[in-house]
Image (tube, rainbow, N blue to C red):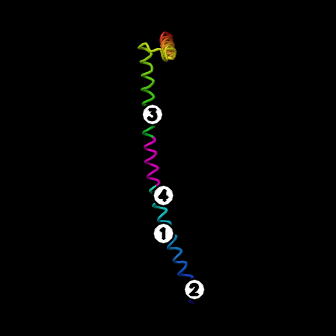
Amino acid sequence: MSNIEDIVDALEDKIEKILHKLDTLQQDNLRLSKALESSQTTIQSQHNQLLDWQDKYETLKMANTILGSDDDKRETKLKINALIREIDHCIGQLSE
């Protein structure tokens, strides 16, 4: 009978250790989930800032070109020509 009691005690100890490990892993998972969510929020915020800065950079490039800067003049002329073509196309559609 003692042998069965020893086996049951050993089994109880193993189950207790497994439950403790499960609790620890669940806590770690929760902590990591929160860290992941925080990181994703930070990445999204930085992505939005990047897009904002890219837009500001393009606007600044356009302004510098219009003000007489030699940099990117060709690019600005192409954009202006594209805008003129779009306006002409819209006028054409309105007159039909």
How far is the residue under mark 1 from the one under mark 2?
24 Å
Rendering quarter of residue 53: top left
* Residue designated by label 1: 20
Magenta stretch containing residue 17, yes or no? no
Name the element at disc 4.
Answer: helix
Q: Where is residue 66 in the image (x, y as percent from the top left)?
A: 43, 14
Q: Where is residue 17 in the image (x, y as percent from the top left)?
A: 51, 72
* Residue designated by label 4: 29
The circle on residue 50 is 3
Say how many tags the image has.
4
Closest to the camera, between mark 3 and mark 1, is 3
Name the residue rendered at 45%, 40% in the picture.
Answer: 44
* Amino acid found under the numbered disc labelled 3: Leu
Name the element at disc 2.
Answer: helix
Prevalent SS, magenta region: helix
Name the element at disc 1.
Answer: helix
